[in-house]
Image (cartoon, rainbow, N blue to C red):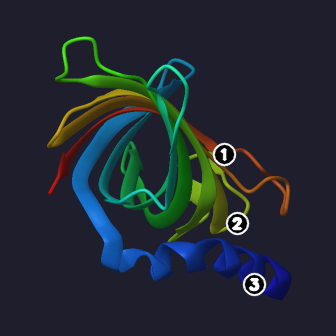
Amino acid sequence: MKKQTAFILVLLLPMGAQARNLDALGVSGGGGAYGHSRHTSSLSVLAQTAPWWQSRLQGGSELMLLGEGRLSWNARGSDSLWGISASPLLRWQFPSASGALSPYVQAGIGAAWFNGTRLQDTDLGSRWQFIDQLGVGLAGKSWDLALRAVHYSNADLKKPNNGLDLLELSVLYRY
């Protein structure tokens, strides 16, 4: 357990060091369907940093690395879990044809901690989880809208490793 905690803390350190560079705040909501009667709802508050690194590519697109933290709440029936997570996100943003909204794709893998290990009949195996994200979105000057697939899993560090799969819509305001 000490090795797992140390490993996850090492993953979280870059987010803490970049907290002064917060660039956007927002919300994300969605859910996932599991079988006929196991629907999971999700709601998160998001904070993103300004890019830690970025590079303009040939053709005008940009590749950037930024950080994201989230406070999340997941519910199924009368059960719920809340958690915190931090992820680096790799974003490939394309130039806008109209100059208003720029499409992008992004992916990230980070660390998460939940206040419990069960959500009804789903046993996550551990409070410590990894968060994987894959999304597409539109970025404007002040707003960002994205559709994301989010997966929580403990990567078989502890059995069982059932995980949670969610589809979320997120809106961020850049200040």
Q: Which residue is drawn at 16% across and 23% down?
A: 100
108 vs 174, nearest the viewer: 174
Rounded to the nearest whole Å, what is the CA distance between mark 1 and mark 3?
Answer: 21 Å
Q: Residue furthest front?
A: 58
Q: Position of residue 69 (x, y in %)?
A: 42, 63
Quarter of the image holding residue 73?
A: bottom left
Q: Earlier in the sequence, mark 1 or mark 3?
A: 3
**Residue that mark 1 sits on:** 163
**Which dot marks residue 79?**
none
Q: What element carries label 1?
A: loop
Rounded to the nearest whole Å, what is the CA distance between mark 2 and mark 3?
Answer: 15 Å
Total tally of numbered discs in the picture: 3
Q: Can residue 38 be seen in this view?
A: no
Q: Residue at x 42, y 27 (%)?
A: 104
Q: Position of residue 142 (x, y in %)?
A: 14, 43
Q: Residue furthest bottom?
A: 2
Query: Which of labels 1 and 3 is toward the front?
Result: 3
Q: Earlier in the sequence, mark 2 or mark 3?
A: 3
**Residue type (three-letter) at the residue carrying disc 1:** Gly
Q: How crowded is mark 2: few (under 14 residues within 10 Å), some or many (20 or more)?
A: many
Q: Where is residue 82 in the image (x, y as percent from the top left)?
A: 41, 63
Rounded to the nearest whole Å, what is the CA distance between mark 1 and mark 2?
Answer: 10 Å
Q: Is mark 3 on a helix, strand or loop?
A: helix
34 left or right of 27 in image: right
**Residue that mark 2 sits on:** 126
Q: Residues within 10 Å of mark 3 (few under 14, many from 20)?
A: few
Q: Earlier in the sequence, mark 1 or mark 2?
A: 2
**Residue that mark 3 sits on:** 6
**Residue type (three-letter) at the residue carrying disc 3:** Ala
